[in-house]
Image (cartoon, grey):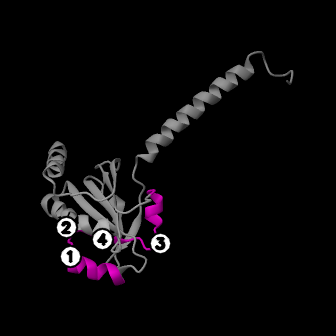
Amino acid sequence: MPKFWPPGFLMTFAVALVITIIFSQGEAKEKTHLAGDFTLKNLDGQEVSLRQFRGKYLLINFWATWCGPCKIEMPSLEELYRRFKSDKFDMLGISNDMFGSRVVRPYVKAKNISFPVLLDQRMIVSHQYGIVSLPTTILIDPQGVIIGVLQGAENWSDPETLLYFENLLKKS
């Protein structure tokens, strides 16, 4: 051990290092809950960014036309959107279809989907959000904090689910 280090330096340094690591991990955990901004094109070729939805609850559904469970839950997502679409709530569908609007547009039209659908053909945003299976749905609060993640299909028009969203939107 070098002689120029004062007595107790290593112990103080070790404690400071541990505190720094713990503090950094705490900050990292907080940051992982914030929804990272992104910009994708919609079916009309217009760019849509996450930041446009700040100030309202946003439900993001990652899906694809080839995904069976995605197709099953799509009508109930549409029902949820039509019921709660407001200045407090919005929804985005993010399609992982590699052929983009060529396959997504006819599907959206045939199923009468009215909520905005964005194209993530190269799955950049899906990777950014750690999506490993479809469908995956993320709920973001008005401040941009991720407050819920659900992997797998859900019946979004179930009375309990509708009550959850009613109560959530009453609070804000």
Amino acid at dot 2: Pro
Task: Tell me the residue at 25%/61% (across/down).
Answer: 91
Q: Residue at x 35, y 84 (%)?
A: 102
Which numbered disc flags the more N-terminal residue, 4 or 3? 4
Residue 34 sits above or below residue 121 on the image: above
Mark 3, other Cα within 10 Å: few <14 / some 14–19 / many ≥20: few
How far apart marks 1 and 4 lie (CA) works out to: 13 Å
Circle 4 SS class: strand
- Amino acid, disc 4: Val
- Disc 1 to disc 3, C-alpha distance: 24 Å
Q: Which residue is mark 4?
A: 117
Identify the residue position indicated by label 2 in the image: 75
Q: Position of residue 163 (x, y in %)?
A: 14, 48
Which residue is identified by label 3? 122
Question: Is there CB contact under 8 Å for labels 2 and 1?
Answer: yes
Three-letter residue code for mark 3? Arg
Magenta stretch in the rendered image: 102-130
Q: Indicate yes or no whether the magenta region holds residue 109.
A: yes
